[in-house]
Image (cartoon, rainbow, N blue to C red):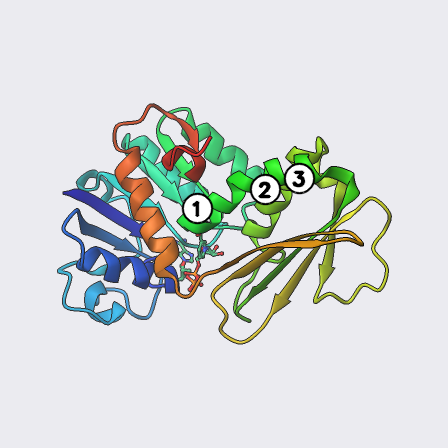
Amino acid sequence: MISIAISGAAGRMGFTLVRCIETSNKFRLVAAVDRQAHPDAGRDIGTLAGCKEAGVKLSDSLLPYISNANVLIDFAFHEATPANVEIAADSGKPAVIGTTGLTQEEMSNILSSAARIPIVYAPNMSLGVNLLFSVLTKSAKTLGDDYSISIEETHHIHKKDAPSGTALRLGEKVAEGLGKKFSSIMFHDEEGKSEVIPEGKLPVRSYRRGEIVGDHTVIFENTAERIEFTHHAWNREAFAMGALRAAQWITDKAPGLYDMQDVLDLR
Ligand code: NAD
């Protein structure tokens, strides 16, 4: 049994993880942490997540519980993530980070923690998307500049960051195949409103619609043909199950920063 502490436990991903852990015989929940002054603090997280009692109360602090956990899983808010991961690092506990929208400074704090503990950081934990990552670099390398390439992502209207972390990672994989730096070719086309895409740029179109969990498409197109790679996440279990797979993988790894390509042996 692998003991899991969740940070961001009262969020959409947190609740999904709680439900997945409840039905698993490989994992058990030992801590459920969310922001300070959360209105549900002190209540049973299983009940809050809509399953049976978990015997774990929603708390506002990771520190008292981290020693009981084998792995921290963080799906919270980017400003909170480095501090939670540092608490894990201070106790020598591995961390799996799903939170997106981390700034450069927050990312460098994560890297400092990765010198002490193994960390899996992946903006998209789904197995399908990670398989997509692994074919995109090769596709871009093969098709190259003879095709115009674009990326589209659609998510629910509550999503705070745009483009999505996944869309950015898809772009990095394409850029890698083209032998270019993603930051120098990325063009964020919010809601697809731009009429003109500057020459040599890779448009990343982000849409916010209803309750869509996460759709990503990468398109390669020229006058002769069009190739689309599309991934639809039907529900958040796709991410939660990936995070739990990462939690299982990471328990015996050396300190360092890893991603789902490492977890799934896709390099
Ligand atoms: P959400 O807003 O429903 O949940 C986030 C939770 O974090 C909230 O309950 C919030 O109160 C809590 N939080 C805020 N500050 C905190 C703190 N200091 N300590 C602990 N918890 C704190 O969001 P969500 O849809 O569950 O997504 C959470 C994050 O995960 C986002 O960054 C999202 O983009 C990302 N995400 C990643 C993947 C992936 O596969 N990597 C998949 C889905 C979502």
Element at badge 3? Answer: helix
174 vs 101, left or right, is right
Residue 259: in sight, yes or no?
no
Q: Which residue is mark 2?
A: 136
Mark 3 and mark 1: span between their CA atoms?
A: 33 Å
**Within-10-Å neighbours for mark 1: few <14, some 14–19, many 20+:** many
Q: Give residue 81's mark.
A: 1
**Within-10-Å neighbours for mark 3: few <14, some 14–19, many 20+:** many
Report the amino acid beneath label 2. Answer: Leu
Element at badge 2? Answer: helix
Depth check, mark 3 against mark 1: the one in front is 3
Depth check, mark 1 against mark 2: the one in front is 2
Q: Is residue 20 above or below residue 134?
A: below
Q: Is residue 255 above or below residue 177?
A: above
Residue 145: in sight, yes or no?
yes
Residue at image location 29% in from the left, 41% down from the top: 247
Report the amino acid beneath label 3. Answer: Ala
Do residues under tags 3 and 1 come within 8 Å of each other at their CB atoms? no
Element at badge 1? Answer: helix
Do residues under tags 3 and 2 come within 8 Å of each other at their CB atoms? yes
Residue at image location 76% in from the left, 42% down from the top: 185
Q: Nearer the viewer, residue 184 or 141?
A: 141
Asked whether mark 3 lies closer than 8 Å to ligand 1, one says no
Mark 3 and mark 2: span between their CA atoms?
A: 6 Å
x and y percentages locating residue 246 in the rendered image:
33, 41
Q: Which residue is mark 3?
A: 140
